[in-house]
Image (spheres, rainbow, N blue to C red):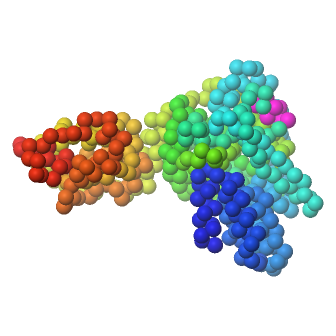
Amino acid sequence: MDAPASDVRALAASGRLDEAEALLADHLSTQLRHGEARLGWAALAAEIGSVSLALDELRAAAHEAPDSASVATALADLAGELADLGVEHPCATPTVFAPPAPPPTEPDAATLARYLHAFGGREGVHARQWVSPQADGTLRQGYAPQQIPLTPRLAAAHLAGDCSLGTYLIRLDDTVTFFVIDLDIRRKALAAAAQDHQENRRVRQVLAASTAAIEARLGAHGLACIVEDSGHKGRHFWCLLQAPMAADLVHRFGRALLAALSADLPPELSLEFFPKQGRVDADGLGNLIKLPLGVHPVSGRRSTFLDRAGRPVETPWATLASTRRVAPVEVMAAFEALRADAAPPPPSPAEAPTPQAEAALRKVIAGCPVVATILTRAAETRRIGHDERIVLLHSLGHLAAGLGPIEALFRACPEVPLRDVPAKVRRGHPISCARIRARVPHITATVACHCEFPCLGEYPSPLLHAAGAT
C-alpha cells in the first residue's frame, strides 16, 4: 500500500483532491483485497475527503467479513467522521441538539458584502453541497466545485436555505483571511445519545463545556472568534484576520493549536483545523468548509452564531460586524506561546561573551549586508526560511557572541524547529560568500553582496569582517 498511498497523499497535500481521488479509485479497481484488508484503503479515502470511496470500501468489508469487530468499529467511526453517512439512526441529530433556529433577518446589500468579504476565500470558485438518498435508506453527500465566484445572489440563496455552499480557504496567492476550528461529536457518542435521554443530556453538556473552554483558550491568546452551531453535530470557531497571512504559516500554527487543545479534549469529541494544507497547486483547490448561517441538508437544521452562554444570537449580522479581526502579530504571539508551552526550557546560559567577542559580532553584522538583512527581516516578520537559517548558523554560529542572538531569533520565529537552535559554537569552515549567494539569491541580488577583503588569497566569508576586532 505504501507507494500508491504516498502518491495519493502527495496529491491531496498539494490541494489536487480530484486527482488524488481519481488515482485512488483507479488503483482500487485493479487491486485484490478482501474483508479487513479494505480498512486501510477506506481510511485513506476518508483522509482525502472521498466520501463515496470510503463508504464503498467499508460496506464491502462489512459484507465480506460480517463477524469482524475491526470492520464494525471502523464502519461506525469512519461513517461518523463522514457527516452522518451510512448511519443506522439517521434521525439521531435532532434528538441531541435543540430545535432549529429561525432564519436570520434578510441581509441588505452592505451586509452581504461584509459576509462575502469575511468568508469569501479562494477567488473565482466555490463549492455546492449535494445529498443523494440511497436504496438502503442512507444518505450520500459531498461537495462539487463550481468554477464561478461567490456572488451576493449565491450568498443570499445559501442564507435562505435554498442551497448549501462551501468556501475554499486558500486564495490564489497562498494566503488566507480567516481560519476555523471544527469541533464535532464523534459518531459513537452521537448514536449513544440518540438512544438514551441521560446520555443525550451528558453529551450536550460535554459539547457545551468544551466549546466554552476552547473559546476561553482562544481569548487567552488574544484570538477573537465567532462561535457557530454548525447545524449538524458540532461547533465552528471562526477567527477573521485583520490582514491576509501566508497559508503555510497559519496551517503550522493550527497544528500547534490543535496539539494544545487536544490534550484536554473529551473522547466524545474530535477537532480539525482549517486550512488543512499550507498551499495548493495552481490547478488545485484544497479543503473547503461550509459557509456559516446556512441550513445543513442532512439534519435540516440552520447553523447559528452563539453568544458566550451558548445561546443563538438574535442578530448575527451585528455579531459579524462587531467581532474584532485578529491581527497577524496576535497569531504570531499565540504561535510562539504555544510552542513555548510545548518546548523544553532553554539551556542554562553560558559565560557572557568577552567585549572582544561582542565587537567581532558587531563588525560582521555591519560588514555583511546579507547577514544584516536576514537578521532585520526575521526580527520584523518573525519568519525565517531554512536557507536563511543555514547562513546564520554557518556564519554567526562560528562566533562566541553569535549564539545568543541566533538562539533568541530562532525562538522568536515559531516555525523554526527547536532542534535548529544552536547549543554550541560551530567548528570548521564557515560558509563562503559564494555559498551564501547560492543559498539566498533573493537577498544577495537586492543588497551590495560584493565585499572587498584586503587579502585576495583568503577564504571569502562574512567572518573576515571580524578581523582586528577589539
Q: Is residue 402 visible?
A: no
> Residue 29 in magenta?
no
Residue 146 lies, with reference to residue 265, above or below; the image says: above
The answer to which quarter of the image holds residue 307 is top right
Q: Quadrant of the N terminus?
A: bottom right
Image position of 327 (left or right of 100): left
Q: Is residue 2 visible?
A: yes
Residue 22 lies, with reference to residue 151, above or below; the image says: below
Image position of 168 (left or right of 402): right
> Residue 160 in magenta?
yes
Q: State whether the magenta stretch is mostly helix, strand or loop.
A: helix
Q: Which of 147/66 is in front?
A: 147
Report the residue that reaches farthest toward the right. 135
Q: Position of residue 336 (x, y in %)?
A: 42, 45
Residue at 67% x, 58% y is 20
Q: Position of residue 306 (x, y in %)?
A: 70, 36
Residue at 67% x, 25% y is 114
Q: Which of 381/457 is in front?
A: 457
Report the residue that reaches farthest toward the front. 456
Q: Quadrant of the C terminus?
A: top left
Q: Position of residue 321 (x, y in %)?
A: 64, 25
Provide the residue span drawn in magenta. 155-162
Residue at 71% x, 68% y is 27
Q: Which of 3/375 is in front?
A: 3
